[in-house]
Each structure stands twice: as structure tokens, then as C-alpha cells.
Amino acid sequence: MRIRYKPWARPELEASKFYIDTPEEYKGKWKQQFKNEKQPLYIELGCGKGGFISQMAIKHPEINFVAIDLVDAMLGVAKRKIEEIYKNENKEITNVYLTRYDIERITNIFDKSDEIKRIYINFCNPWPKGKHKKKRLTHTRQLEKYKEFLTEDSEIYFKTDDDNLFEESINYFKQTGFTIQKITYDLENEENFWENIETEHERMFKEQGIKIKALIAKNTKE
């Protein structure tokens, strides 16, 4: 998803108390950055404009969240969205951080000491061309990296509109030792599948008649 350059984004992010610009410095220390460091830590990869993380974080003050993206403009919009939602609820922002980083190098910013319990991947770039598939956030190359810092029995929540990405991702998860716990090819009509936070992308795809595919993969012990 492309977004226009926003000159205000970088200054606002740098001034924000819940944005971290040097995440490498926090590797193994993420829990200590939160007001309640004993809470479980979940991360979202490719948070975009923050439609998901802003809603999930406000609904679950008992969970700590880190949301990652590579584009300042996206993170700037996400920051404003989080601020707006928390302001409307008259709550302090204490359980979510935003950070800018290349997810292909994610093992530089997390390790087992961070005790990450869950990863969310929502409508990531499908990278359909063969030579680009290794860039997928669900590719085996990436999944092996996630396993370096995920806790035992942690989970990955994944949803997409792309049929090919979904089918190939199922194989990626199996190849890397994850167990598919739940799966659906029509999330909208699947009752009690999970607590679904509808994103901007999701609404757009539904309006086009595209069914949303989703799964939960568990990081089982080797």
C-alpha cells in the first residue's frame, strides 16, 4: 500500500513518547519499556496506518504491543490514530509502541528475552513474482527468524485477501514446524474464529466481494 509523503510525520514521531527510532538498542529489553512489564508482549508486522493496532491496544490494556513498519508516513498516521482513540477513551498510552524497521532484519531487534507471545500479520505484500517471494512476511526464511525470538507455544495470526499467498503460506508454516490450529477461507462468515479487528484493507476487499482468508499457526516445540 502506497502513501504520500507527509512532512510532519518524522518530526511528530521523534517527539512521541510511544515511538522508538533505534529499536536495536532495545533487543532483549522490550518488556522493561512498558508501564507494566509483566504483561504479555504481542507484535504487529507491517502496521500500516494503524487501523488494527490502535483498536487492539485500546481494547486490551492487559497486553503490551509493538507495531512495526518501514514507512514514516504510515507510522505518522498510525501515531495520530492511536492518540485519537486513547484520547476519546480518556486513557493514557502505556501499552503500545511504534517503531520503524526493516522486518527482514527483525532478529536485530528481538530475542528470546523479549518473550513475544504472538505475531499479527495483516494483509502483507503478497510479492507474487517468484524471484520476490522470499520477501513475504510468511516465507520460510522469515518464519525461521521469528522462531529465534518467539516463546514456545506462541502464535502467529495471519490474514490476507490473496489466494496464492495464503495457500503457499500454509506450506511455509508447515515446513518450518508450525502447527495450523485454525484456518478459514471466509473469515467474515466464520463464527467465533478469533477476535477480528477489521482493517481498512479488509473493508475494501469485502466491498469488492473478495473473501478474507485467515489462520492461526502455533510455534510448537521441536
Image: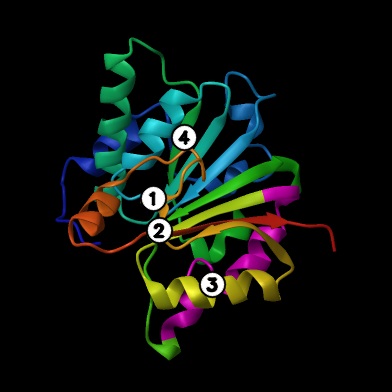
Looking at marks 3 and 2 on the same chain, the residue that comes earlier in the sequence is marked by: 3
Residue 169's label in the rendered image is 3
Is label 1 or label 3 in front?
1
Which quarter of the image is occupied by the N terminus?
Answer: bottom left
Is label 3 or label 2 in front?
2
> Residue reaching furthest bottom?
131
Q: Residue at x 52, y 78 (%)?
A: 168
Looking at marks 1 and 3 on the same chain, the residue that comes earlier in the sequence is marked by: 3
Residues at marks 2 and 1 touching, judged by CB atoms closer than 8 Å? yes
Query: Mark 4: which amino acid?
Result: Tyr
The location of residue 48, given as percent across then percent down, is: 32, 50
Q: Residues within 10 Å of mark 4 (few under 14, many from 20)?
A: many
Considering depth in this image, is 108 or 135 the residue closer to the camera? 135
Q: Which residue is mark 1?
A: 189
Query: Mark 3: which amino acid?
Result: Ser
Q: Is residue 88 visible?
A: yes
Judge whether residue 135 is colored magenta.
Answer: yes
Q: In screen coordinates, is 75 left or right of 64?
A: left
Q: Which residue is mark 4?
A: 97
Mark 1–mark 3 Cα distance, whole angstroms, equals 21 Å
Q: In screen coordinates, is 65 left or right of 10?
A: right
Mark 4–mark 1 Cα distance, whole angstroms, equals 32 Å
Q: Residue at x 43, y 41 (%)?
A: 196
Query: Mark 2: which amino acid?
Result: Asp
